[in-house]
Image: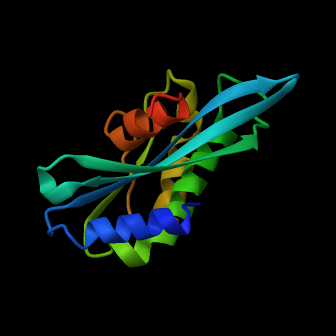
């Protein structure tokens, strides 16, 4: 997921910070087509809110995978893959961040009128089961909805 250099940068930053620091993990994706095949660009982020008041530092990874969702308006597989990727990141960085307050955010909507709602319960259950952390979904999952979204769309 993250490179060794990114992990070292995260560790180097964290040793300079106090216990008011919060860590936010999130993932978002964008669907696109290459010829007739659907793909997704996934942006997975770790956001360090320094000392609770001194701004943030965003670390990110972008990856690409085929998207096999049959219905573009019900992106269940892509939402589950976002949950999987944020769990992979958590597993990778957990030994370095366990002394800080950690939140996991997903860009999955809890409102049934939105397509991503089709995966809300499964994605949240996956995160809770794999990490022991109850994730925050829309509208509270800002690390995914804003941080990762900006990177997935090329704005970060």
How many labels were placed on the picture? 0
- Position of the C terminus by quadrant: top left
Work out whether residue 72 or residue 50 is closer to the camera in this orientation and state it.
50
Query: What residue do we see at 27% from left, 68% from top?
Result: 14
Q: Is residue 39 visible?
A: yes
Q: Residue furthest bottom?
A: 95
* Residue depicted at 55% across the width and 51% down the height: 83
Nearer-the-camera pick, 135 or 9? 9
**Residue 24 appears left or right of 38:** left
Left or right: 91, with 39 as reference point: left
Q: Would you say 154 lies left or right of 52 here? A: right
Could you say where residue 52 lies in the image, as x and y percent from the top left? 14, 54
Quadrant housing the N terminus: bottom right
Seen at 46% across and 28% down, the residue is 155
* Residue drawn at (51%, 62%) of the image: 89
Which image quadrant is residue 94 in? bottom left
Colour scheme in use? rainbow
Residue 119 higher or lower than 104, as above or below: above
Q: Can the viewer see residue 132 in this picture?
A: no
Q: Whole-percent x and y of residue 17?
A: 18, 67
Residue 90 % position (x, y): 47, 65
Report the residue that reaches farthest toward the right: 36
């Amino acid at each position: 997921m993250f490179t060794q250099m990114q992990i070292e940068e995260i560790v180097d930053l964290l040793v300079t910070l106090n216990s008011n620091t919060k860590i936010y993990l999130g993932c978002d994706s964008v669907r696109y087509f290459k010829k007739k095949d659907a793909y997704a660009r996934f942006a997975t982020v770790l956001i360090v809110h320094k000392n609770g008041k001194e701004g943030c530092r965003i670390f990110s990874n972008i990856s690409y995978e085929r998207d096999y969702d049959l219905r573009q308006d019900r992106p269940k597989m892509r939402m589950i893959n976002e949950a999987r990727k944020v769990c992979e990141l958590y597993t990778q960085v957990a030994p370095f961040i366990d002394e800080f307050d950690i939140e996991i955010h997903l860009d999955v909507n809890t409102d049934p009128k939105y397509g991503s709602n089709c995966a809300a319960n499964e994605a949240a259950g996956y995160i809770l089961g794999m990490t022991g952390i109850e994730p925050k979904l829309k509208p509270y999952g800002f690390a995914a909805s804003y941080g990762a979204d900006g990177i997935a769309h090329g704005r970060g």
